[in-house]
Image (cartoon, rainbow, N blue to C red):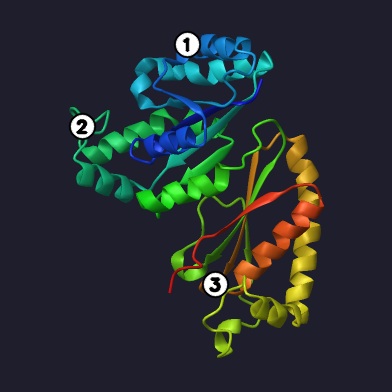
Amino acid sequence: MRPLLIITGLSGSGKSLAARVFEDLGYFCVDNLPVTLIPVFADLVTRSHDSVRDVALVIDIREGAYLHDFPRIVMGLKERGVPTRILWFESATDALIRRFSETRRPHPLSADLPLETAIAREREAMTEIRDLADRVIDTTRFNAHELRAFLKSEFSQLDTVAGLNASVVSFGYKYGIPMEADIVMDVRFIQNPFFVESLKAKTGRDSQVVRFLENLEEYREFVRRLDEFVAFLLPGYNREGKSYLTIAIGCTGGKHRSVAAAEALARRLAERGCPARVTHRDIEKE
């Protein structure tokens, strides 16, 4: 059986949008299935003999008291050999408040509580579920368009059979560190092509920028050592059953050094038999 994908997290953090993205990617998505029916649903999918291949469930605070059964049910599935992968979506409280204000939709717990209190209650109630997550996705800095693009980039070629799904993200420190990153590397110590007039308007995808960087000993040495470091980590992550690994590489603006280094690392990962998706988060920003 292919892994059962469970989308969960805080209200307003992007779960519904994520479900629509996975539907676009060919998943059969079920929203708010009672958690007590998850084992029954998993059995139905198993007996479908691959007529239903990719399945995603959305589970959240609307489950009410039954939510307490979720960790036990997930452990039960794993003991039966049913693979599961849990994606947890979250955002900063001020971002959640702004989104509820913009959409004018009520928080599931806000009937008799102030919105900020309802969000705090939800965080507390779902702490145990967050601890089970294979991947945490912080959507604080995403608008709807950016989140949709990010999810499609991250999961359009997801290997849902087994193994580690690796992503390499380039970013600019001036726009903040990617919250979903497991490993963050800083390449601001490398000479910046931005200050070379002929390279300023180009990016780390352009051959001229790549040649400039590859002529720098510190860049070549960084890529070599990062490749060795990640190669050392991958077997350990696989042994521990980690499903997702996001490596973020940052420079000042996220256009030159980090982009080239991310592309170089992804190529080396592919050579090691671990193809990685590459996302250049800030390459289009000024």
Residue, disc 3? 255
Separation of residues labelled 3 and 1 (CA atoms): 47 Å
> Which quadrant of the structure image shows residue 217?
bottom right
Q: Which secondary structure lies at badge 3? A: loop
- Residue that badge 1 annotates: 37
Q: Position of residue 13 (x, y in %)?
A: 38, 41
Q: Nearer the viewer, residue 148 or 116?
A: 148
Seen at 67% across and 67% down, the residue is 261
Left or right: 115 with respect to 280?
A: left
Query: Residue at position x 52%, y 81% from top?
Result: 201
The crowd level at tag 2 (other Cα within 10 Å; few <14, some 14-19, many 20+) is few
Asked if 6 appears above or below 79 in the picture, the reply is: below
- Category of crowding for the residue at label 1, using alpha-carbon neighbours closer than 10 angstroms: few (below 14), some (14–19), many (at least 20): few
User: Which residue is painted at 31% across and 45% down in the image?
Assistant: 96
In the displayed structure, 151 sits above or below 243; it is: below
Please name which of the two marks, 3 or 1, marks the residue nearer to the observer: 3
Tag 1 secondary structure: helix
| Residue position marked by numbered label 2 in the rendering | 113
Name the amino acid, label 3. Lys
